[in-house]
């Protein structure tokens, strides 16, 4: 991708960082910190490693002080706390006697949830950008604001792979593909932690629905766990260097998530080499002994299970060893040392230090990069229509998800504001709420172009009961009927979807244009207007599949799969998640994974494939500059009937901006892991013998170039 597309936002943030002289973790000087004099407190010596400093400090702590470090001290943390101006999501008070500073924490997968902040586009919009640098900018922006609200740690990113499009937190993650989630999570983390703020990637290990989330029993086979749900966390730890990994809710194969020894101790720490901190999601801890022995380091929001009474009792009964307590305390201290929390002054909670212009630019750029053009029958970009009718209440709003990812924006630019300003005085822009379809049709009939805004409602605590617009947002009435009524009244109808994920579009054949703008953040109107008028190319591609019918979607029609029977669900679909499900079933989607149109056209040629890399040439064959998102898929051979492989899996992507007639050669690096499957018997990644189908195209269903690797007939 050309650096120029991100340069303004990146440069603005870089200038701020330069003025603030931000130091990377571990670079702070002791005399500027809160730890104290190394002569009196040897663990304050910054020339020592985090492990050495931890080993010096731990023996100086009393038993009560150790226990105090293993839980948040904020009884007001959680879903409500972050809405207050100066309230952190969680706080650990530290130990003043020993120079152990407090740790302040904030929710942050979509922006900082602490009073007002920059409302970034929903993470699903970031995922639609298919852009690693966009993810880095996103994490950097969140952490920069979290830092200046006095936070040391931010809860994000959310990398849970989407299993069902009814999931209430679809908007909060990166979609249905583990490779996409992993490769966006890593730069998000790096961008954030470069600002001196720790991240907490969540929710380890399997978190796929809100229905019964606190008590859900999930049965997931080892291969599915390794190939679908764990890769984003593995990448976050190994490649992203995540400071913390948050465990979630429910039981995985009979073990509660925050006391799952098999995942937290054996996989996360022993196998992946994680040395950071494992905090719990709020109220997720079920049992004191199980959590302590199962790998949990810190309980949030308060010590309901990790408190002096229960932990001391368990130690006295020899159900927990003192060595186990010390190991958890060491994980907390080591992480704080590693990220310089001891060695700097507390970050000030000062809104005036936030460069709102830089954050605003980042919000607009990320939204432009994620807006996805699903259909265009020649109506876009707009060609200076004399009149535009905006229909639907979302034209005056900026829809967003609710729960711990809900952000109260500094300011909001509505679609009506943005389009009206961009259209100028020569275009009459009218608004109709759409509450009365007859009135809306009349308004549409009187305009050259009608733009209908439709939205769903989703968020934490509740799953959607179906995928129709009416079901997702019943208070707005029959939005599908409204779209059809407007389309009949005006042949030049465009639909703008502000949804957190896939919805049904039964009216798709009746309208000329469809744009998925997601939950767009506070720069909604400016970003949308620039895309509608062609000031920028729509940069988004679908990170989720849009089905034709409700029953086409994964896990539909099988209650044992979703939402479960008696609070128990079996992931019997295995690795056939998302587009893999549609491909394996031979079901045509409405809009496939990876789909998204440009205002120009592209051709692919010259595919060359090896086990090290795949190369292909991309050419802009149109008459204007545009954004291409070449995607690499591989169809892997099955080593046996008990190891079914999906027809294709995403193994690479990139994003390039090309001028008319311009060509570029793109390279997708491959490794042995790219071609491997999880061998259950060997408990290891293995590369099967056979023929590997190599496919490059503009979506999972639009394959332009093919090749082969391996032993092929």
Image (tube, rainbow, N blue to C red):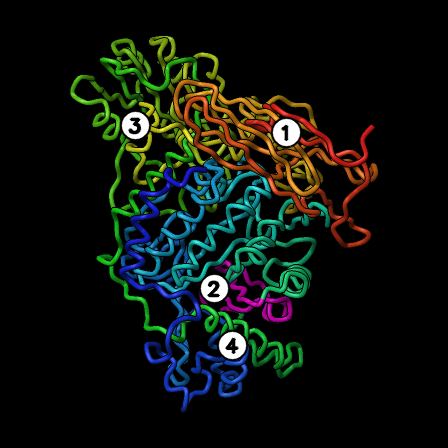
Kindly check if marks 1 and 2 are in contact, taking CB atoms under 8 A apart as contact: no
Name the spot of residue 5 as percent of width and height, x first.
37, 37
Position of 385 relative to 422 (above/below): above
Secondary structure predominantly adopted by residues drawn in magenta: loop
Name the spot of residue 22 as percent of width and height, x first.
34, 63
Image-quadrant location for residue 31: bottom left
Which of discs 4 and 1 lies nearer the camera? The answer is: 1
Report how far apart the C-alphas of labels 4 and 3 lie in the structure.
51 Å
Which of discs 1 and 2 lies nearer the camera? The answer is: 1
Of the two numbered discs 4 and 3 on the same chain, state the one appearing first in sequence. 4
Q: Which numbered dot is residue 49?
A: 4
Report how far apart the C-alphas of labels 2 and 3 lie in the structure.
42 Å
Image-quadrant location for residue 452: top left
Q: Is residue 291 magenta?
A: yes
Name the residue that disc number 2 marks: 300
Mark yes or no: residue 473 visible. Answer: no
Q: Label 2's element?
A: loop
Please tell me how crowded label 4 is: few (under 14), some (14-19), or many (20+) other residues with Cα within 10 Å: some
Name the residue that disc number 3 marks: 529
Which of discs 2 and 3 lies nearer the camera? The answer is: 3
Mark yes or no: residue 76 visible. Answer: yes
The residue lying toward the viewer, choosing from 611 and 266, is 611
Name the residue that disc number 1 marks: 607
Of the two numbered discs 2 and 3 on the same chain, state the one appearing first in sequence. 2
Which of discs 4 and 3 lies nearer the camera? The answer is: 4
């Amino acid at each position: 991708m050309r650096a120029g597309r991100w340069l303004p936002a990146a440069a603005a943030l870089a200038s701020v960082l330069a003025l603030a002289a931000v130091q990377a973790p571990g670079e702070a000087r002791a005399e500027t910190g809160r730890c104290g004099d190394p002569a009196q407190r040897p663990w304050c010596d910054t020339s020592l490693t985090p492990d050495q400093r931890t080993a010096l400090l731990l023996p100086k702590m009393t038993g009560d002080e150790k226990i105090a470090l293993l839980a948040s001290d904020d009884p007001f943390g959680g879903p409500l706390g972050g809405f207050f101006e100066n309230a952190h999501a969680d706080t650990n008070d530290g130990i003043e006697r020993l120079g152990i500073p407090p740790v302040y924490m904030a929710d942050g997968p979509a922006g900082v949830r602490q009073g007002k902040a920059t409302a970034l586009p929903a993470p699903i919009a970031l995922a639609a950008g298919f852009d690693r640098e966009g993810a880095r900018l996103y994490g950097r922006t969140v952490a920069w604001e979290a830092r200046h609200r006095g936070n040391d740690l931010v809860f994000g990113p959310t990398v849970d792979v989407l299993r069902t499009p009814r999931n209430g937190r679809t908007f909060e993650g990166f979609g249905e593909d583990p490779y996409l989630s992993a490769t966006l999570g890593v730069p998000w983390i790096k961008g954030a932690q470069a600002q001196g703020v720790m991240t907490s990637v969540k929710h380890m290990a399997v978190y796929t629905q809100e229905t019964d989330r606190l008590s859900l029993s999930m049965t997931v086979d080892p291969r599915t766990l390794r190939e679908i749900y764990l890769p984003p966390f593995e990448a976050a730890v190994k490649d992203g260097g995540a400071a913390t990994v948050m465990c979630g809710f429910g039981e995985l194969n009979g073990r509660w998530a925050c006391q799952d020894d098999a995942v937290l101790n054996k996989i996360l720490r022993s196998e992946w080499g994680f040395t950071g901190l494992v905090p719990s999601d709020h109220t997720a801890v079920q049992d004191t002994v199980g959590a302590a022995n199962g790998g949990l380091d810190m309980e949030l929001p308060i010590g309901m299970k990790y408190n002096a009474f229960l932990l001391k009792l368990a130690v006295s009964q020899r159900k927990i060893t003192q060595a186990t307590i010390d190991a958890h305390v060491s994980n907390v201290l080591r992480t704080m040392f590693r990220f310089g929390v001891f060695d700097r002054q507390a970050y000030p909670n000062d809104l005036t230090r936030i460069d709102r212009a830089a954050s605003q630019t980042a919000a607009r750029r990320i939204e432009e990069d994620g807006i996805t053009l699903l259909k265009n029958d020649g109506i876009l970009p707009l060609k200076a229509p004399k009149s535009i009718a905006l229909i639907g209440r979302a034209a005056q709003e900026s829809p967003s998800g609710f729960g711990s990812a809900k952000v109260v924006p500094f300011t909001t630019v509505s679609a009506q504001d943005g389009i009206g300003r961009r259209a100028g005085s020569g275009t009459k822009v009218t608004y109709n709420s759409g509450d009365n379809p007859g009135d809306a049709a009349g308004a549409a009939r009187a305009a050259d172009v009608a733009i209908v805004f439709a939205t769903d409602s989703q968020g934490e605590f509740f799953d959607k009961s179906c995928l129709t617009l009416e079901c997702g947002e019943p208070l707005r009435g029959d939005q599908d009927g409204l779209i059809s009524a407007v389309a009949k009244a005006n042949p030049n109808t465009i639909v703008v979807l502000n949804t957190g994920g896939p919805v049904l579009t039964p009216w798709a054949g009746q309208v000329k244009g469809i744009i998925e703008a997601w939950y767009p953040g506070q720069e909604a109107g400016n970003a949308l207007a620039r895309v509608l008028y062609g000031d920028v190319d729509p940069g988004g591609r679908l990170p989720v599949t849009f089905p034709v019918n409700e029953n086409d979607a994964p896990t539909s029609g099988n209650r044992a799969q979703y939402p479960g029977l008696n609070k128990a669900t079996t992931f019997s679909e295995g690795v056939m998640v998302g587009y893999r499900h549609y491909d394996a079933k031979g079901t045509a989607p409405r809009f496939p994974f990876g789909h998204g149109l440009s205002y120009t056209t592209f051709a692919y040629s010259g595919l060359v494939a090896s086990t090290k890399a795949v190369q292909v040439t991309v050419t802009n064959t149109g008459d204007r500059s545009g954004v291409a998102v070449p995607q690499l898929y591989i169809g892997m051979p099955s080593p046996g009937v008990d190891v079914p492989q999906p027809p294709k899996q995403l193994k690479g992507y990139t994003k390039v901006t090309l001028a008319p007639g311009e060509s570029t050669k793109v390279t997708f690096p491959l490794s042995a892991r790219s071609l491997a499957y999880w061998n259950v018997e060997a408990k290891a990644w293995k590369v099967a013998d056979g023929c590997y189908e190599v496919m490059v195209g503009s979506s999972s269903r639009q394959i332009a170039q093919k090749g082969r690797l391996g032993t092929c007939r």
